[in-house]
Image (cartoon, grey):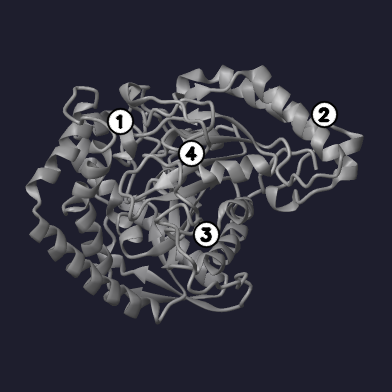
Amino acid sequence: MSQSVARSRTNHETIARNSSPPLEAIEAAYDRIEAERDRNCWIYLRPREEALEACRKLVARARTGENLPLLGIPFGVKDNIDVEGMPTTAACPAFSYTPWHSAHCVERLTAAGAICLGKTNLDQFATGLSGARSPYGPCASVADARYIAGGSSSGSAVAVAAGHVAFALGTDTGGSGRIPAGFNNIVGIKPTVGLVSSRGLVPNCPTIDCVSVFCNTVSDGEAIIEIIEGFDFEDPYSRLPRTFSFATGTVPSFRFGRIASADIECFGMPECGELYERACERFAQIGGTAIEVDFAAFRQAGELMFSGPWVAERNSAIASLMDINSGSLLDVTRTVLGSAAGYSAIDTFGAIHRLHRLRRDAEAIFAGIDALVVPTAPRPFTLEEMDRDPITLNNRLGYYSYFANLLDLCGVAVPNATLPNGMPMGVTLLAPAWHDRALIGLARRFEASAGRAAFELKSGG
């Protein structure tokens, strides 16, 4: 039986009458995964029979009337997020350990009846935006195997886009929950930092890390966020919301910020800018009024991520877990982390003070708009190009994404259009912290304007 996550809020009589669909969904998922091992999107796959047995037990519980809104829905988890009994590697085999407890977000999903099928590939220690920095092999876009999938949550995005699972968890520090969505024609939701507990997440930059969701429709992503969100006292980075906006995005008119045409940066691929213009036209068609904004504050905040002392936080987090000079890390990972030595405490506090000024600039801009619309990434790069110049091109990928968590924004990446070479290019909607629901509402309207057929998640309800 097909239905979206958002509508799978329990129909136990139907489940009791027919328990085969959840099992069929799990079987079909494993068949697809085994037929496409060359995608490199899985690091660890749960044994098929173990997943099926877990599903049978859930179906039996549902027959007794237990509320399991995600009954039998298969999902994947980025391998820097703990799942009980499954190894966590962060794409570094020497780091591998098997946790006794799942991450808080995973616990909530499994309690709702979802079935975790395994751990997905990533840029090592989530250090990268390409999906090509893993000893388990690079991930390519499902649209064209010559091109990167985007990272660091590459495996999670590919697993969803390839139809292996209905949704997957990723993480986002500087764009890892958005860029892979853009290059694989799916949805990526990056919630407000602290809205979803990061307990059980291998740290990258702990002060700005967040769990993200990859899915096929905005409504599906919203349903997953509703399950995993919430304050977690045991997570020192969890936050109580100041306000929540429950706007559904049905207000006829809204204002959206856009980048001036002359300021769009596509790094030598102008056709990407044309697709961004098309997206802005679509927003106008659904009731939006375009407001050109000065992108300088966002660009400057993003520069603090890749050429500022936040790399020292990343170095500190990973060095607390393992010796980064042990030879266990990829050369590119070690090079990135090694740059942290060039920053002093004085540099760090100077950057923090600079960031607070930029946050005020961003607040002034958002006072006049409901959301900022940017390309999810400037352009796609091939795996070959990324291999030749991994650091420069990686930093270019983050041009429109690095600043979001630093400026305390939430974001939703949605499909937009396809380049002449066949690669999908998405756009991302951004808004200040705690405006997640209003942003999701606008993203849903944009999605509907494309006439995209809703992808129905498999469940037993």
Distance Cα–Cα, label 2 vs label 3: 36 Å
Q: Nearer the viewer, mark 4 or mark 2?
A: 2
What type is the residue that disc 2 sits on? Ser
Q: Which of the numbered marks, if any, corresponds to residue 157?
A: 4
Q: Which of the numbered marks, if any, corresponds to residue 20?
A: 2
How many C-alpha atoms fall within 10 Å of the one at disc 2: few (<14), some, or many (≥20)?
some
Residue drawn 30% across and 54% down? Answer: 402
Is residue 438 visible from the viewing direction of this image? yes
Distance Cα–Cα, label 3 vs label 4: 26 Å
Residue drawn 19% across and 24% down? Answer: 326
Residue drawn 8% across and 53% down? Answer: 344
Distance Cα–Cα, label 1 vs label 3: 33 Å
What type is the residue that disc 4 sits on? Ala
Residue assigned mark 1? 133
Question: Does the CB distance between marks 2 and 3 fall below 8 Å?
Answer: no
Badge 1 or badge 4: first in the primary sequence: 1
Q: Nearer the viewer, mark 2 or mark 3?
A: 3
- The x and y percentages for residue 215 are 57, 45
Badge 4 or badge 2: first in the primary sequence: 2
Distance Cα–Cα, label 1 vs label 4: 15 Å
Q: Which of the numbered marks, if any, corresponds to residue 231?
A: 3
Q: Nearer the viewer, mark 3 or mark 4?
A: 3
Q: 140 or 267: which is nearer to us?
A: 140
Is residue 278 visible from the viewing direction of this image? no
How many C-alpha atoms fall within 10 Å of the one at disc 1: few (<14), some, or many (≥20)?
many
| Mark 4 secondary-structure assignment | helix
